[in-house]
Image (cartoon, helix red, strand yellow):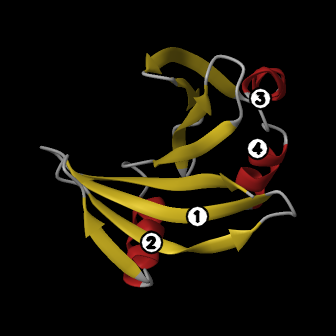
Amino acid sequence: MSQVLGLLENSPDRPRSKRYLHDLPFHFVATQQQGKMIIDAYAVGDFNSLVVGYSLFYYGQDGYLASAALSVNPMNESAKQKAIDLIERALDSVSSPDGSTLHFLGIYDWDNKRVLKIMIRKRQTSIVPDYDIEYAVSYR
Protein backbone atom coordinates (compact mmCIF):
# COMPACT_ATOMS: atom_id res chain seq x y z
CA MET A 1 0.00 0.00 0.00
CA SER A 2 2.91 2.37 0.56
CA GLN A 3 3.77 2.40 -3.16
CA VAL A 4 0.15 3.22 -3.96
CA LEU A 5 0.05 6.01 -1.38
CA GLY A 6 3.24 7.43 -2.90
CA LEU A 7 1.62 7.32 -6.32
CA LEU A 8 -1.57 8.94 -5.05
CA GLU A 9 0.30 11.57 -3.04
CA ASN A 10 2.27 12.62 -6.11
CA SER A 11 -0.76 12.52 -8.40
CA PRO A 12 -3.24 15.09 -7.09
CA ASP A 13 -4.06 16.04 -10.68
CA ARG A 14 -3.29 14.71 -14.14
CA PRO A 15 -0.35 17.00 -15.08
CA ARG A 16 1.54 16.25 -11.85
CA SER A 17 0.69 12.58 -12.12
CA LYS A 18 2.19 12.38 -15.62
CA ARG A 19 5.40 14.04 -14.42
CA TYR A 20 5.67 11.69 -11.44
CA LEU A 21 4.95 8.53 -13.44
CA HIS A 22 7.48 9.53 -16.09
CA ASP A 23 10.24 8.82 -13.54
CA LEU A 24 8.90 5.42 -12.42
CA PRO A 25 9.38 2.04 -14.11
CA PHE A 26 5.86 2.18 -15.61
CA HIS A 27 5.18 2.26 -19.31
CA PHE A 28 2.44 4.53 -20.61
CA VAL A 29 -0.12 2.45 -22.54
CA ALA A 30 -3.03 4.69 -23.52
CA THR A 31 -5.41 7.51 -22.68
CA GLN A 32 -9.15 7.14 -23.04
CA GLN A 33 -11.95 9.62 -22.49
CA GLN A 34 -15.24 8.42 -20.99
CA GLY A 35 -17.64 11.32 -20.74
CA LYS A 36 -16.01 13.91 -18.51
CA MET A 37 -13.47 11.40 -17.18
CA ILE A 38 -9.96 10.87 -18.58
CA ILE A 39 -8.29 7.51 -17.99
CA ASP A 40 -4.53 6.98 -18.29
CA ALA A 41 -3.29 3.38 -18.36
CA TYR A 42 0.23 2.30 -17.41
CA ALA A 43 1.86 -1.12 -17.53
CA VAL A 44 4.47 -2.47 -15.15
CA GLY A 45 7.41 -3.96 -17.05
CA ASP A 46 8.26 -6.61 -14.45
CA PHE A 47 6.22 -9.74 -15.20
CA ASN A 48 6.95 -11.12 -11.73
CA SER A 49 5.52 -8.12 -9.89
CA LEU A 50 2.32 -8.30 -7.87
CA VAL A 51 0.72 -5.61 -10.04
CA VAL A 52 0.86 -5.56 -13.85
CA GLY A 53 -0.80 -2.23 -14.50
CA TYR A 54 -2.41 0.94 -13.22
CA SER A 55 -5.45 2.81 -14.50
CA LEU A 56 -5.80 6.37 -13.22
CA PHE A 57 -9.12 8.19 -13.55
CA TYR A 58 -9.23 12.00 -13.57
CA TYR A 59 -11.99 14.60 -13.56
CA GLY A 60 -11.23 16.13 -16.96
CA GLN A 61 -8.10 16.73 -19.01
CA ASP A 62 -6.15 18.49 -16.24
CA GLY A 63 -8.41 17.54 -13.36
CA TYR A 64 -8.08 15.95 -9.98
CA LEU A 65 -7.45 12.25 -9.49
CA ALA A 66 -10.77 10.46 -8.92
CA SER A 67 -9.51 6.90 -8.51
CA ALA A 68 -6.68 4.50 -9.18
CA ALA A 69 -7.10 0.84 -10.09
CA LEU A 70 -4.24 -1.65 -9.79
CA SER A 71 -4.44 -4.80 -11.90
CA VAL A 72 -3.25 -7.81 -9.95
CA ASN A 73 -0.82 -10.03 -11.89
CA PRO A 74 -2.88 -13.13 -12.86
CA MET A 75 0.30 -15.18 -13.37
CA ASN A 76 1.68 -14.48 -9.88
CA GLU A 77 0.20 -17.02 -7.45
CA SER A 78 1.21 -14.95 -4.42
CA ALA A 79 -0.56 -11.87 -5.83
CA LYS A 80 -3.72 -13.85 -6.56
CA GLN A 81 -3.72 -15.36 -3.08
CA LYS A 82 -3.30 -11.90 -1.52
CA ALA A 83 -6.31 -10.70 -3.54
CA ILE A 84 -8.36 -13.67 -2.35
CA ASP A 85 -7.30 -12.97 1.25
CA LEU A 86 -8.47 -9.36 0.88
CA ILE A 87 -11.84 -10.51 -0.46
CA GLU A 88 -12.27 -12.82 2.53
CA ARG A 89 -11.78 -9.80 4.81
CA ALA A 90 -14.19 -7.54 2.91
CA LEU A 91 -16.75 -5.63 4.95
CA ASP A 92 -19.39 -5.76 2.22
CA SER A 93 -19.85 -6.86 -1.40
CA VAL A 94 -22.05 -5.81 -4.28
CA SER A 95 -22.57 -7.17 -7.79
CA SER A 96 -21.89 -4.77 -10.64
CA PRO A 97 -23.86 -4.58 -13.89
CA ASP A 98 -20.76 -5.79 -15.79
CA GLY A 99 -20.90 -9.13 -13.91
CA SER A 100 -18.01 -8.36 -11.57
CA THR A 101 -18.24 -8.23 -7.80
CA LEU A 102 -16.98 -5.23 -5.88
CA HIS A 103 -15.74 -5.95 -2.35
CA PHE A 104 -15.49 -3.01 0.05
CA LEU A 105 -12.34 -3.20 2.20
CA GLY A 106 -12.47 0.06 4.14
CA ILE A 107 -11.88 3.77 4.29
CA TYR A 108 -8.50 5.40 4.80
CA ASP A 109 -8.46 8.94 6.19
CA TRP A 110 -5.65 10.16 3.96
CA ASP A 111 -5.29 13.82 4.92
CA ASN A 112 -7.45 16.82 5.84
CA LYS A 113 -8.68 17.11 2.22
CA ARG A 114 -9.03 13.53 1.01
CA VAL A 115 -10.43 10.15 2.00
CA LEU A 116 -9.73 6.89 0.18
CA LYS A 117 -12.35 4.20 -0.24
CA ILE A 118 -10.49 0.92 -0.83
CA MET A 119 -12.14 -1.89 -2.77
CA ILE A 120 -11.25 -4.98 -4.75
CA ARG A 121 -13.08 -5.94 -7.93
CA LYS A 122 -13.24 -9.57 -9.04
CA ARG A 123 -14.15 -10.45 -12.62
CA GLN A 124 -14.34 -13.92 -14.07
CA THR A 125 -12.64 -14.06 -17.47
CA SER A 126 -12.73 -17.04 -19.79
CA ILE A 127 -9.33 -18.12 -18.49
CA VAL A 128 -8.81 -17.02 -14.86
CA PRO A 129 -10.37 -14.69 -12.30
CA ASP A 130 -9.19 -11.10 -12.70
CA TYR A 131 -8.63 -8.83 -9.68
CA ASP A 132 -8.28 -5.03 -9.46
CA ILE A 133 -7.59 -3.16 -6.25
CA GLU A 134 -9.33 0.20 -6.47
CA TYR A 135 -8.73 3.38 -4.51
CA ALA A 136 -11.53 5.93 -4.91
CA VAL A 137 -10.59 9.45 -3.85
CA SER A 138 -13.23 11.58 -2.11
CA TYR A 139 -12.62 15.27 -1.51
CA ARG A 140 -13.98 16.97 1.59
| The N terminus lies in quadrant | bottom right
**Quick one: SS at disc 2?**
strand
First of labels 1, 3 by sequence position: 3
Closest to the camera, between mark 4 and mark 1, is: 1
Residue 70 x/y as whole percent: 53, 47
Q: Which of marks 2 and 4 is nearer the N terminus?
A: 4
What amino acid type is highlighted by mark number 1?
Lys
Residue identifier under label 2: 104
Which one is earlier in the sequence, the residue at label 1 or at label 2? 2
* Secondary structure category for the residue under label 1: strand
Q: What element carries label 3?
A: helix
Q: Residue 117 carries which label?
A: 1
Label 3 – label 4 distance at C-alpha: 8 Å
Query: How much space separates mark 1 and mark 2, taking CA atoms?
Result: 8 Å
Whichever of labels 4 and 1 marks the residue nearer the N terminus, that label is 4
- Residue at image coords 64%, 52%: 137
Q: Is residue 45 visible?
A: no
Q: In which image quadrant can residue 84 be found? A: bottom left
Foreground residue, 97 or 82? 97
Q: In which quarter of the image is the C terminus?
A: bottom right
Q: Are marks 1 and 2 in contact (CB under 8 Å)?
A: yes
41 relative to 75, above or below: above
User: How far, Cα to Cα, is label 4 from label 1?
Assistant: 16 Å
Q: How crowded is mark 4: few (under 14 residues within 10 Å), some or many (20 or more)?
A: some
Q: Is residue 34 left or right of residue 49?
A: left
Residue 121: give x, y in percent of width and height.
Answer: 37, 57
- Which residue position holds label 4? 7
The residue that mark 3 highlights is 17
Say whether disc 3 or disc 4 marks the residue closer to the N-terminus.
4
Q: Are marks 3 and 4 in contact (CB under 8 Å)?
A: no
